[in-house]
Image (cartoon, rainbow, N blue to C red):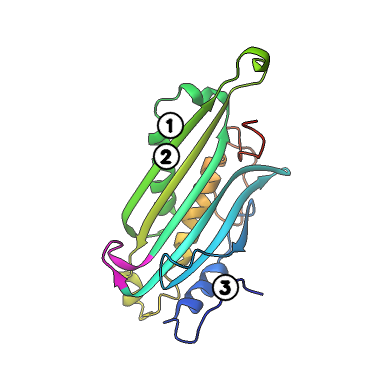
Amino acid sequence: MSVHRLTPSDHGFGRAIAAMTATPLRPEVELTEIPAPSRMAPHTWAASGEVLMHDEELASGRLVVLFDPDGNEGWQGRWRMVALVQAQLEPEFAIESMLGDVAWSWVTESLELADASAHELGCTATRVVSQSYGALASRPSTVDVEMRVSWTPDEDEAEAADDPHGTVLLAPHLVAWSSMLAAAGGLPPSPAPVAPITPSHRARSPRPGDEA
């Protein structure tokens, strides 16, 4: 049962979400529908995602889909994707000054590879290095990366395909977000049906208690 209530007058929002969630993702990504924030737009949907490999969580995040049938000036469109990506990287990334640029490349390349045309794209990448001293000096250093990304899907292609409700519009953007998760988790680009053998870097999702 869906955790969201969709009214008959949702302007095709329900159909668009149903088509999007039917899209196959790469096998390492697990998607779970969660309650969406209701005040951000007239219609909202949200999910959490995890990248799992060999029973280990490599990355995690959330995706919120916003829809305003009247359009939103700040979005420059009717739809808006708001994404969170989190992962814990190996200590070598503590001295990687270009990590922000690498994280940005995960975003742009994921959108490009998924053919997810977008505008008003923005990203904030935060790196947190945790080092322990004194009685806790034996604990290894950790590096956490958090990416907050938002973008507006281009609706020109949906209009050209005579799809006024955007039924096929959102699928590439869900794939793109899942690819951002996979990249943060150290997995190389891969089509959905193909599972990579090894990660390109060691990573896991931050866990409760890591900062204790």
- The magenta region covers 71-79
What percent of the width, then of the height, locates residue 164? 36, 80
Residue 156 on the magenta span: no
Q: Is 115 drawn above or below residue 53 in the view shown?
A: below
Secondary-structure class at tag 3: loop
Observer-nearest of 143 and 177: 143
Q: Residue at x 68, y 14 (%)?
A: 135
The quarter holding residue 188 reads top right
Front disc: 3 or 1:
3
Lateral position of residue 78 relative to residue 31, left or right: left
Observer-nearest of 17 and 36: 36
Lateral position of residue 94 relative to residue 27, left or right: left
Amino acid type, label 2: Ala
State yes or no: discs 2 and 1 in contact (Cβ < 8 Å): yes
Lateral position of residue 148 relative to residue 18, left or right: left
Q: Pick the quarter of the image with the C terminus.
A: top right
Instruction: Categorize mark 2 by other alpha carbons within 10 Å: few (<14), some (14-19), many (20+).
Output: some
List the residue tagged with mark 3.
4
List the residue tagged with mark 1.
99
Q: Residue at x 57, y 73 (%)?
A: 4
